[in-house]
């Protein structure tokens, strides 16, 4: 990254320098060469869900323009590239009953080209795009999904694992569950507050644990790779540090985002006590007595404890947290959480309103993860800065953002002794930013997704030649 000056000597020589993307956000080719539809195809085609009814039908057309993406990766001199597989491009109906050879060819080419250029691939198996055929079967709410996911994962380990050594099972189970099933703003667009969110999160953990155990038992000795799950988290501090209620709410806020998944995988094999007790208390308060909302991990299947070979963290922003436990609220995730995150006026906002720029929050979060989750090796698998409005290739403030962020990571490494192994910028390309469509741009390269050529142009923050 040429315009960005790295703090000298701060990063170990084998530190991973990468950029990340996700299949639905860049590939396009939504129905090409035998690909089956995913829930995001259905969601976008339904209209009224996404900014100006845009879709990922074409996106950056990385399905046909991979060579252009490779040039971008080469130009940046990246050591790593994180991509995701489209499940329904490989297995059109989601099951291994039918494999799409063109899909296998596509990812083989991507992986082989990366390796030929000394770029290490990190592959995410699931980044929000469930095969529609499996959604029709009940999707992530069905207990069967763990089985389907495990078969898909095994298929990928078998087919690509001779070359892919870094795997992420599920990207951001929090976002999938909360946005897809609680708020309904992501596919599949269900609004079932306070119930499905926990069931979906649970099935994602079950699916992840199954896949990790499959890798561990059948592939690790041959392939020697690593498998994890990518967890997103804000960094949170109490709005009023002198208020014990806000301090408690802050711990709860972190547990309901990060601990929900990190505690079962890295600490106890079960959900955080804060979640269990809050949900129980709310059940009593609201007289909710149907099936338990927060499911239990059963003895007769693999437990999530110990099922991550490294910690994969997606960090974007920070929040100040206030206690809301005295507010009246209906059955909902936020009612259970009883903590509200607000932004501080001193924090600049970049592009989208949720993205307060707080690089020092990343350092604090890394230290928190070290202390809370037993000093794991950490890859920052996503972090970035967005732009909205007119395209500005001279993205001076993004350059500053990367500079500040890398300083904070350097401090985490040197002063806090956090075992950070790598950093992946979100994203290699401007791409389909889910409900925001193409109106929010996170790329290191600009892609004009409104033009037919879809030309990639480097932003100032990473390229010196402007
Ligand atoms: C990541 O999620 C995703 O993995 C990636 O695909 C995405 O492109 C990237 O973020 C940038 O957004 O509109 O106020 O309701 C990060 C988690 C999920 C945080 C969506 C912000 C919208 C908040 N993000 N969320 S709001």
Image (tube, rainbow, N blue to C red):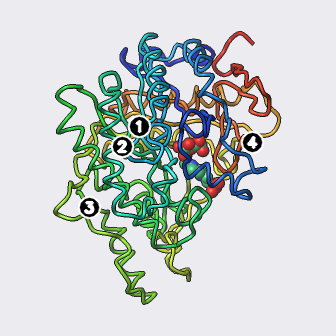
> Height in image: 79 above or below 157?
above
Which residue carries the number 4 mark? Answer: 439
One can see residue 281 in this view = yes
Q: Helix, strand, or loop for circle 3? A: loop
One can see residue 318 in this view = no
- Any atom of ligand 1 within 8 Å of the CB at mark 4? no
Mark 1 vs mark 4, CA separation in Å: 35 Å
| Between discs 1 and 4, the one toward the N terminus | 1
Which residue carries the number 1 mark? Answer: 99
Q: Quadrant of residue 410?
A: top left
From the viewer's side, name the closer residue of 176 and 362: 176
- Any atom of ligand 1 within 8 Å of the CB at mark 2? no
Mark 3 vs mark 2, CA separation in Å: 31 Å
Mark 4 vs mark 3, CA separation in Å: 39 Å
Question: Of circles 4 and 3, which is in front?
Answer: 4
Q: Residue furthest right?
A: 390
> Height in image: 147 above or below 192?
above
Residue depicted at 54% across the width and 31% down the height: 405
| Between discs 3 and 2, the one toward the N terminus | 2
Quadrant into which the N terminus falls = top right
| Between discs 4 and 3, the one toward the N terminus | 3
Residue 280 at x, y percent in the picture: 35, 79
Which residue carries the number 3 mark? Answer: 270
Residue 96's tag is 2
From the viewer's side, name the closer residue of 248 and 143: 143
Residue 314 at x, y percent in the picture: 48, 41
Q: Are marks 2 and 1 in contact (CB under 8 Å)?
A: yes
């Amino acid at each position: 990254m040429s315009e960005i000056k790295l703090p000298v000597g701060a990063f170990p020589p084998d530190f991973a320098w990468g950029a990340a993307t996700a299949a639905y956000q860049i590939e396009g080719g939504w129905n090409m060469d035998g690909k089956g539809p995913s829930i995001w195809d259905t969601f976008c085609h339904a209209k009224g869900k996404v900014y100006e009814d845009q879709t990922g039908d074409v996106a950056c057309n990385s399905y046909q323009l991979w060579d252009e993406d490779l040039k971008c990766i080469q130009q940046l001199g990246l050591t790593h590239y994180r991509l995701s597989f489209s499940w329904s491009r490989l297995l059109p109906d989601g099951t291994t009953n039918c494999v799409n050879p063109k899909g296998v060819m596509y990812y083989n080419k991507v992986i082989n080209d990366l390796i030929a250029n000394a770029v290490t691939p990190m592959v995410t198996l699931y980044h929000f795009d469930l095969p529609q055929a499996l959604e029709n079967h009940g999707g992530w709410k069905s207990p069967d999904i763990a089985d389907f996911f495990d078969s898909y994962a095994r298929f990928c380990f078998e087919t690509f694992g001779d070359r892919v050594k870094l795997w992420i099972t599920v990207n951001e189970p929090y976002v999938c569950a909360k946005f897809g099933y609680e708020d309904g703003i992501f596919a599949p667009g269900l609004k079932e507050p306070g119930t499905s969110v926990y069931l979906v999160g649970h099935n994602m953990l079950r699916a992840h644990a199954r896949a990790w155990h499959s890798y561990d038992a059948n592939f690790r000795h041959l392939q020697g790779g690593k498998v994890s799950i990518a967890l997103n988290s804000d960094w949170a501090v109490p709005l009023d540090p002198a208020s014990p209620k806000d301090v408690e709410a802050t711990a709860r806020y972190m547990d309901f985002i990060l601990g929900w998944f990190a505690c079962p995988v890295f600490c106890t094999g079960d959900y955080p006590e804060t979640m269990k007790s809050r949900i129980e208390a709310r059940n009593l308060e609201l007289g909710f007595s149907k099936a338990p909302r927060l499911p239990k991990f059963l003895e007769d299947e693999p437990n999530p404890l110990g099922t991550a070979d490294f910690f994969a963290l997606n960090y974007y922003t920070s929040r100040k947290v206030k206690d809301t436990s005295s507010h009246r609220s209906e059955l909902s995730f936020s009612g259970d959480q009883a903590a509200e995150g607000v932004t501080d006026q001193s924090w600049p906002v970049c592009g989208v309103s949720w993205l307060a720029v707080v690089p020092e929050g990343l350092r604090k979060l890394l230290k928190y993860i070290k202390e809370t989750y037993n000093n794991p090796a950490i890859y920052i698998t996503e972090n970035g800065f967005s732009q909205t409005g007119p395209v500005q290739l001279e993205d001076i403030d993004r350059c500053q953002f990367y500079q500040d962020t890398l300083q904070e990571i350097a401090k985490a490494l040197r002063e806090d002794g956090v075992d950070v192994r790598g950093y992946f910028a979100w994203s290699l390309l401007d791409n389909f930013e889910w409900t925001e469509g193409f109106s929010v741009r996170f790329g290191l390269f600009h892609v004009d997704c409104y033009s037919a050529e879809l030309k990639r142009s480097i932003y100032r923050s990473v390229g010196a030649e402007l």
